Image (cartoon, rainbow, N blue to C red):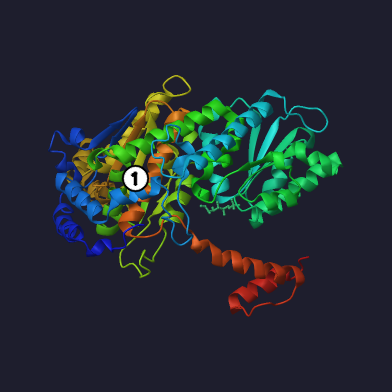
Amino acid sequence: MLKKIHPTHTMAWEKLLRHYKEIKKVHLKDLFKDKKRFEKFSIEFEDILFDYSKNKINERTIELFIELADEMALEKAIASMFEGDRINETENRAVLHTALRSFKQKYVHTGSHELYKNIENVRNKMRSFSNDVRSGKWIGYSGKKITDVVNIGIGGSDLGPYMVCEALKHYADGPDLHFVSNVDGAHISETFKKLDPETTLFLIASKTFTTQETMTNAFTARDWFLKKAKDQKQVKKHFAALSTNTEKVVEFGIDKENIFEFWDFVGGRYSLWSAIGMSIAVSIGYERFEELLKGAEAADHHFRTADYKKNIPVIMGMLGVWYADFFGAECEMVLPYDQYLHRFPAFLQQLSMESNGKSVSRDGSKVNYRTGQILLGEPGTNGQHSFYQLIHQGTHLIPADFLCAKEPLNELADHHCKLQSNFLAQTEALMIGRTKDEVIEMLEKSNVPETEARKVYLHKVFKGDNPTNSIIYDKLTPYALGKLIALYEHKVFVQGVIWNIYSFDQWGVELGKELAGKILSELKDKKVEAPHDCSTEGLLKHLRKGGK
Ligand code: G6Q
């Protein structure tokens, strides 16, 4: 089980507080007087280069964080996760998404052979199903090949596979993929416009098979299909389920043969590696899906074996804690200079904010320090033309991760060079900034009259001193993507351990769901079930007025 101590009660925390008071005064660009900084604070792991030298740290910072990690028993926590201890204590579950991508089965623990056998069986079933759909062996009720596959799911059953399918679009050579998540009828209606029931396959992705949004969309999809197919028996050719709840799936009318199982030790936001990844296998082919898993497996091995000083997720996690708890940063950004990764920040939002958005510690007491940060992000260079202003000249400290591929997947004139020059320029600008003297000199050189220069120069000063990490991978392959995702998963884990919180539950989403259930009947039946506050009641009445 995980240790239950407050990080603020450790010796290392005290030392870090003292260290912070000194280092906060040093501007980042002054830290670069040490010409070996890049060498000291960068890590190479296979084709990934992780440069964290542009952070407000020195060797002492890392040493103290290692002391903190030791006091918080990080090593034991990592072993507990990989070995299947029930570290998700509030749900009494193990956390074994790593087992789904463990081909070498390095971390097999007693009694887990059956588990690995089950995982392999589902993978084999996924391989043959996805091959059949892609090759045209799997045909629809009227004898036509499947041209479109729709993943119906939400949250963890949508964000992961959707992000990966977008990221690996370059390799997509299967049927067209669509993702429907929102219960807003607009989502499925607009998707239907592109589809023909005769050539469409629905993947109902739901761990519980009870989620309101997913089930509403699934029933709507079935009605839409049956309107044309007419015969209930044909559902088996057009619907498959990715779920842990066989009983509910069968009740819905999906053939037992079309159920792709996974298990309660796979959390929703960690489920893209399971049967929930079926849409990925259908889109890019099963072999490439396995490459994705193998990339993640390599990152798992790195996380388990690399020294903390050379361990990317450990360092990333520590830096996150450093800025949140010592510098008081509220937000962090992930900025991929890679258009294929345009859903990566959205995926990471759930991974990080749902996992570490907690205020009760593992011993049940309220935390008195900051936990999970707000994560935002958009692909570069687009973001530069919108919100970067606030990072450069606003009042917040916003640490940011910049990601970029060394080689492009599309060779087009000098696009990639321009993309990379922006990637490099932004991290440099955020670090060095531009001083008052530099601005005045610049204005003088452009012959701006002195009175005018005095008026505007402050607006042109950049404080700099803003921390960034740079992550470069050779090419966005399935293997590289698998590594990237797993590195971030483990970063979130490290932070949860240091913050002494439970990262694998999500009780905070329950209250809204519960109330929505009650309000739904009030909206439908026009009756009041619960006394509401006057705002909710006023809004409810307004929505009912003139509505159906
Ligand atoms: C993720 C959460 C949540 C979940 C969705 C969908 O970690 O648990 O986002 O994935 O609520 O749940 P189902 O897969 O059960 O429909």
Secondary element at tag 1: strand
Ligand 1 near label 1 (Cβ, under 8 Å)?
A: no
Q: Is residue 244 left or right of residue 109?
A: right
Dividing the picture into quadrants, the one containing residue 132 is: top right
Residue 179, how many percent across, how many down? 63, 42
Q: Residue at x 54, y 48 (%)?
A: 156
**Quarter the C terminus occupies:** bottom right
Residue 106 visible: yes
515 vs 439: above or below: below
Dividing the picture into quadrants, the one containing residue 125 is: top right
Dividing the picture into quadrants, the one containing residue 236 is: top right
User: Badge 1 local density, few (<14 within 10 Å), some, or many (20+)?
Assistant: many
378 vs 537: above or below: above
Q: Residue at x 15, y 55 (%)?
A: 19
Q: Is residue 436 left or right of residue 151?
A: left
Residue 379, how many percent across, how many down? 44, 39
Q: Residue at x 35, y 70 (%)?
A: 365
249 vs 278: above or below: below
Q: Is residue 3 left or right of residue 133?
A: left
Q: Residue at x 31, y 59 (%)?
A: 3
In the image, 455 versus 313, the foreground residue is 313
Count up the numbered dots.
Answer: 1
Instruction: Name the amino acid, label 1.
Output: Ala
Residue designated by label 1:
400
In the image, 229 versus 129, the foreground residue is 129
In the image, 182 versus 390, the foreground residue is 182
**Quarter the N terminus occupies:** bottom left
